[in-house]
Image (cartoon, rainbow, N blue to C red):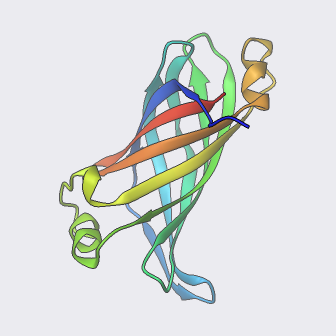
Amino acid sequence: MTEPKSRHLFDLTLRLHPAIDLGITPSGERRVVPISGGQFTGERMRGEVVPNGGADLLLLRPDGALQQDVRLALRTADGAAILMTYRGVRHGPPDVMARMARGEAVAPSEYYFRTAPFFETGSPEYAWLNKIVSVAIGERQPDGVLYRVFEIL
């Protein structure tokens, strides 16, 4: 068995609406973060995040980690519609997480932020996305999120 290899799929920038705080639920502290838009750019595909076409059901767990459950719609530059879903986790030292919660810029080397995106489309040109596994490295920014998404080969 060999070590996994990857290739860059695209960079994704998300703009976010203010979070809707649901409070402490049986699962933890839950927030819904609507996605207002964004864009993605890669060698094999590029386009926009459909405005208001998704949200992150963010959960602050009792162990201090943030668990993501995201669904969003992408529209490629040539018109294909793609559903992108992912789960992920973000954690770091309490002071770093508090700085991010206040909207401060924090270097991505100070925290862990990884997701596992999957794709669904009926577009023949992008049908290959339906059959891949990918991973992403995230960076929380004061006004949104930046991801580098990689196809696992």
| Residue 130 sits above or below residue 125 on the image | below
The residue lying toward the viewer, choosing from 134 and 58, is 134
The residue lying toward the viewer, choosing from 113 and 28, is 113
Number of numbered tags placed on the structure image: 0
Who's the residue at 68% across and 25% down the image?
A: 81
Q: Position of residue 141 (x, y in %)?
A: 28, 49
Residue 152 in which image quadrant: top right
Q: Position of residue 56 (x, y in %)?
A: 54, 57
Who's the residue at 73% across and 31% down the image?
A: 132
Who's the residue at 49% across and 26% down the image?
A: 10
Q: Tell me: 99 left or right of 149.
A: left
The residue lying toward the viewer, choosing from 152 and 82, is 152
* Residue that sits furthest to the front in the current view: 1
Screen quadrant of the N terminus? top right
| Residue 56 sits above or below residue 66 on the image | above
| Residue 45 sits above or below residue 31 on the image | above
Who's the residue at 34% across and 68% down the image?
A: 92
| Residue 47 sits above or below residue 135 on the image | above
Residue 129 in which image quadrant: top right
Q: Position of residue 105 (x, y in %)?
A: 18, 54
Residue 119 in which image quadrant: top right
Q: Position of residue 120 (x, y in %)?
A: 75, 34
Screen quadrant of the C terminus? top right
